[in-house]
Image (cartoon, rainbow, N blue to C red):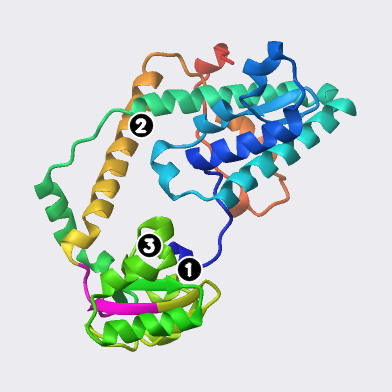
């Protein structure tokens, strides 16, 4: 239901089919006239800025395979535009000598450290965590108060068209007895674009106000009137309703529970890993030095107390 919800920034996702279309177009614009010697290189170039290029291969590496089927030409164009703007800024930064900035080495060093830490943490977390079904059920029973439904929810089928006359004719066909899903397959642009009719469950806060104001008033089994929004003309069939202030069923929150347990296990794994690392290296501390960060004129309660350091430890130094 996200397409009917709040407008968000376009995600940097690229559909394989769309990419090939855009790359072909841009190759004609930017690379026409290249020699045969460069043909193998340029045929994979989506965009060239000066001597730097954005290739189809580089873009495809950034896109998870599971995202390809839901992406649009607009998202493709957005990704290419973002890359273009960043490349222009980077090249200008080099041209003006910002790569000689005195803070840059320290920033790069910190970036390297952060990258290595993230790689290591990923390797620790990447091990699969198995969660037995019974453990999830027990978790649900102990935490039912956390799964209270804050809003009404409805489960619907939906037809979306961009022409008002088509919408009213589709509704008349359904009211005369034709199958909702069959009519949707014939006329709905949402089905044509995303193979989608069943919208699942959604809340008023997850859809645009034009829909929220009307669709939640209908009973289960009914077909709504035509509802106009910025996306077009909608017709909904109400399949089910869940009232607010009721506890969600276990099956509704099963995946959330599994993720919570996995997150707890991974946090525990991380803490155990840190403990094991500490046991393999000498760590010498002098937390008393932190008192120098505080002004003596501050009230005592604002001065953080730190544990004293044994004198024997002060004979060592460890960066």
* Callout 1 crowding tier (Cα within 10 Å): few <14, some 14–19, many ≥20: some
Kindly report the distance in space between the C-alpha atoms of the residues bearing marks 2 and 3. 45 Å
Name which residue lies at 22% across and 83% down: 177
Please name the residue that numbered disc 3 is placed on.
191
User: Residue pushed farthest left?
Assistant: 134
Is 93 left, or right, of 164 in this rendering?
right
Counting the numbered discs, the total is 3
Of residues 40 and 143, the one drawn nearer to the viewer in this rendering? 40
Labels 1 and 3: the sequence-earlier one:
1
- Secondary structure under tag 1 reads loop
Q: Quadrant of residue 194?
A: bottom left
Q: Quadrant of residue 47?
A: top right
**Contact, CB < 8 Å: mark 2 with mark 3?**
no
Distance from Cα at disc 1 to Cα at disc 3: 18 Å
Q: Quadrant of the N terminus?
A: bottom left
Query: What's the magenta region?
Result: 235-248
Q: Residues within 10 Å of mark 2 (few under 14, many from 20)?
A: some
**Looking at the image, is mark 2 or mark 1 earlier in the sequence?**
1
* Residue 183 on the magenta span: no
| Residue marked by disc 2 | 270
Nearest the camera: 26 or 63?
26
Q: Residue at x 58, y 53 (%)?
A: 301
Is 73 above or below relative to 117? Answer: below
- Disc 1 versus disc 3: nearer the observer: 3
Identity of the residue drawn at 28% across and 82% down: 174
Queried whether the magenta region covers residue 247, the answer comes back as yes
Give me the disc on residue 5. Answer: 1
- Residue at x-position 26% and y-position 66%: 147
First in sequence: mark 2 or mark 3?
3
Looking at this view, is 313 or 253 the one in front? 253
Residue 132 lies in what quarter of the image? top left
């Amino acid at each position: 239901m996200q397409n009917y919800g709040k407008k968000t920034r376009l995600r940097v996702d690229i559909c394989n089919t769309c990419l090939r279309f855009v790359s072909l177009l841009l190759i004609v614009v930017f690379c026409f006239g290249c020699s045969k010697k460069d043909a193998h290189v340029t045929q994979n170039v989506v965009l060239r800025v000066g001597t730097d290029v954005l290739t189809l291969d580089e873009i495809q590496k950034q896109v998870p395979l599971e995202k390809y089927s839901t992406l649009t030409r607009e998202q493709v164009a957005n990704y290419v535009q973002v890359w273009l703007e960043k490349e222009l800024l980077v090249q200008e930064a080099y041209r003006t000598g910002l790569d000689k900035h005195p803070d840059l080495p320290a920033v790069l060093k910190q970036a390297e450290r952060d990258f290595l830490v993230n790689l290591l943490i990923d390797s620790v977390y990447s091990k699969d965590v198995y969660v037995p079904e019974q453990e999830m059920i027990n978790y649900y029973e102990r935490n039912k108060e956390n799964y209270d439904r804050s809003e009404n929810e409805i489960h619907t089928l939906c037809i979306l068209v961009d022409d008002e006359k088509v919408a009213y004719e589709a509704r008349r066909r359904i009211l005369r007895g034709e199958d909702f899903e069959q009519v949707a397959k014939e006329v709905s642009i949402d089905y044509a674009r995303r193979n989608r009719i069943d919208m699942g469950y959604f809340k008023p806060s997850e859809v645009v106000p034009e829909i929220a104001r009307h669709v939640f008033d209908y009973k289960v089994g009914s077909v709504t009137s035509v509802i106009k929004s910025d996306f077009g003309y909608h017709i909904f069939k109400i399949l089910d309703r869940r009232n607010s202030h009721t506890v969600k069923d276990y099956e509704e929150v099963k995946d959330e529970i599994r993720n919570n347990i996995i997150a707890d296990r991974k946090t525990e794994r991380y803490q155990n890993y840190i403990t094991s690392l500490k046991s393999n290296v000498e760590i010498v501390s002098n937390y008393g030095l932190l008192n120098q960060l505080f002004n003596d004129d501050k009230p005592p309660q604002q001065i953080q107390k730190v544990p004293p350091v044994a004198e024997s430890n002060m004979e060592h130094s460890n960066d």
